[in-house]
Amino acid sequence: MVTPQPDVTFIGTATTVLRMGGFTLLTDPNFLHRGQRAYLGYGMWSKRRTDPALGIAELPQLDAVVLSHLHGDHFDRVARHGLARELPVLTTPEARRKLRRWGFRAAEGLPTWSSHELHRDGSTLRVTALPGRHGPGALDRLLPDVMGSLIDLERDGERQFRLYVTGDTLHRPMLAEIPERFPDIDAMLIHLGGTRIAGVLLTMDARQGADLVELVRPKLTVPIHYDDYPVFRSPLRHFVDEARRRGLVSAVRTVARGETVPLTPPA
């Protein structure tokens, strides 16, 4: 049996459709439109500058949602009211509690390094929660818990593909354990943007993103989460320029909203 090539469709912000083997996943569903406001907590809002490439009604049939954290630009009110309540949502234990209260009965909270598996026709898709930290120092405790995700596709017990989705994390020493535990990462979806609120950096900017590429050394890096809200201060071109300066650009593939690209590097 020939396994289809893994690919990603970029919808906007950190929202993507991932196709790996016979499985289809949705990440961090943000379907607000241009001019609508995402609630960030503590009375703070940010107005979206772009439109999503797809609406919920246009999505393919999904096997699960992978949610890095419960923030208004990652799981918005459109997703809350429009996604099927029986759809598995793989997320942090903190987010799972709130999602269950909202009626998402199949939400699963994954402590760091724990996994959830999906099975179909001899294939296994394993989602493992990885460490992440959304803010510096004590400020992190005021923000939602965040996780990265390692997504392994296996067939008949043999790994076919390994994807790392960073989530909204800063580059911190604890991330060094990821390539130690999980070497040979085929591709990485990296959340960038250099989000700043009150001058405080809350997601990776170009420099931190390039640092993580050098740490993890995936065969391919696809940047997302970089220009949809005014709080994103580090545009995509900064990351591409930094990757070029460090000799990493051949392993970076940019993707436009609405575009589908393979998650395998060029031959």
Image (cartoon, helix red, strand yellow):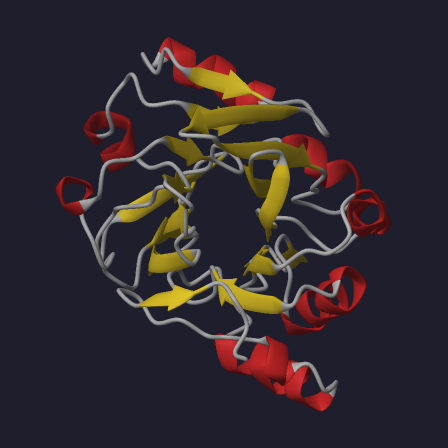
Return the x and y of residue 195 as percentages of the image width and height: 56, 59
Q: Quadrant of residue 126?
A: top right
- Whether residue 195 is visible here, answered yes or no, is yes
Residue at the far front: name it: 1
- Give above or below for 259 relative to 174: below
Q: Quadrant of residue 51?
A: bottom left
Residue visible at 46% across and 74% down in the picture? 254
Q: Nearer the viewer, residue 71 or 241?
A: 241
The location of residue 228, given as percent across then percent down, is 37, 62
Question: Where on the picture, by quarter, is residue 133?
Answer: top right
Where is residue 199? Give x, y as percent.
Answer: 63, 60
Residue 177 shown left or right of residue 55 in the figure: right
Q: Is residue 149 visible in this depiction of the protein?
A: no
User: Is residue 239 depicted above or below 17 in this figure?
Assistant: below
Q: Is residue 208 left or right of residue 94?
A: right
Residue 160, horizontal then vertical, whole percent = 57, 49
Pick whichever, 136 or 184, lies toward us. 184
The residue at 68%/56% (across/down) is 185
Q: Residue furthest left?
A: 57
Q: Quadrant of the C terminus?
A: bottom right
